[in-house]
Amino acid sequence: MSHGATASLVYPDFHGRAGDVLLSMEAENDSNGHCARRKGELKVNAGRLIAVVGVLLLVSACSAVEAFYARYAPVQNIACEERTARQLEGIEFTDVPRIEMIVRHGEFSPMILRLTKGRAYVLRLRNRDTEARSFNAAEFFDNIAVAAVALDNDILPTVCPGPVVEMQPGQSFEMQFLAATDGVYEYRDTGSTGLQIGNFLNAAPPGGIIRIEESY
């Protein structure tokens, strides 16, 4: 005696309705009690099936890429506050070189700063223009350790003022910092559209470089 069974699967399409992908199968038991396939039916809408397969492959590929970066991407930088506290251990700011920098007519002066790795400094930047200026120096801020920050002589509750410092007309920015890592770092006034020179417009925002050199 044989016993028949029918199983079917219907997959929804992308609009949430029953689609055309239908798998149905009838099975029966043979005389030994084993399940034997009697009849199989496959109704497939080829276009939708290819689309479904394509989406599954794309999702699988995206998951693989995310897993790769999660495993092999560089370790995130230690939090600025934690790194700063560690780098400033034993550093004194009682008698350190002072650097005076101004922004006038959209230009920084001096444009080039030369510092020594491992030394402490005080930088005072003044905006002497009649419009707002910015000091955008992301890499520089990532490679120094800031001990204190002030804006117009008001102490700010942060040791991580970067990557951009905004200054209104007449404002001054001051910070005590340690030149922690040697390198050459650019800074720009990213709030500026460029510098007018005669009848020509220099499209590059004004700025300069800060060079931190090894101590020999």
Image (cartoon, rainbow, N blue to C red):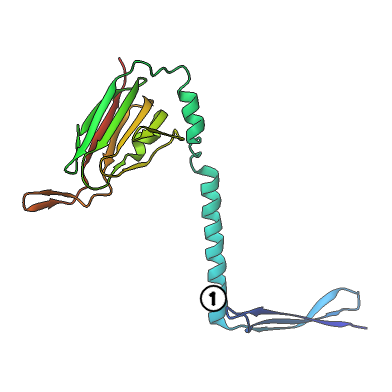
Instruction: Report the number of discs.
Output: 1
Q: Is residue 192 above or below residue 88?
A: below
At a point 55% along the width and 44% down the height, the residue shown is 71
Q: What amino acid is at disc 1?
A: Ile
Q: Quadrant of residue 120?
A: top left
Residue drawn 53% across the image and 75% down it: 51
Where on the picture, by quarter, is residue 153?
top left
Foreground pick, 202 / 36: 202
x 51%, y 54%: residue: 65
The residue that label 1 is drawn on is: 50
* Left/right of residue 32 with respect to residue 40 in the rendered view: right
In this view, 4 is above or below 164: below
Number of other residues with Cα within 10 Å of mark 1, as a class: few under 14, some 14 to 19, many 20 or more: few
Image coords of residue 157 (percent x, y):
46, 35
Image quadrant occupied by the C terminus: top left
**Farthest right residue in view:** 1
Q: Nearer the viewer, residue 84 or 3?
A: 84
Disc 1 element: helix
Using residue 184 as the reference point, say whether residue 26 is left or right of it: right
Q: Quadrant of the N terminus?
A: bottom right
94 shown above or below 51: above
Counting from the top left corner in percent of width and height, residue 105 is at: 16, 43
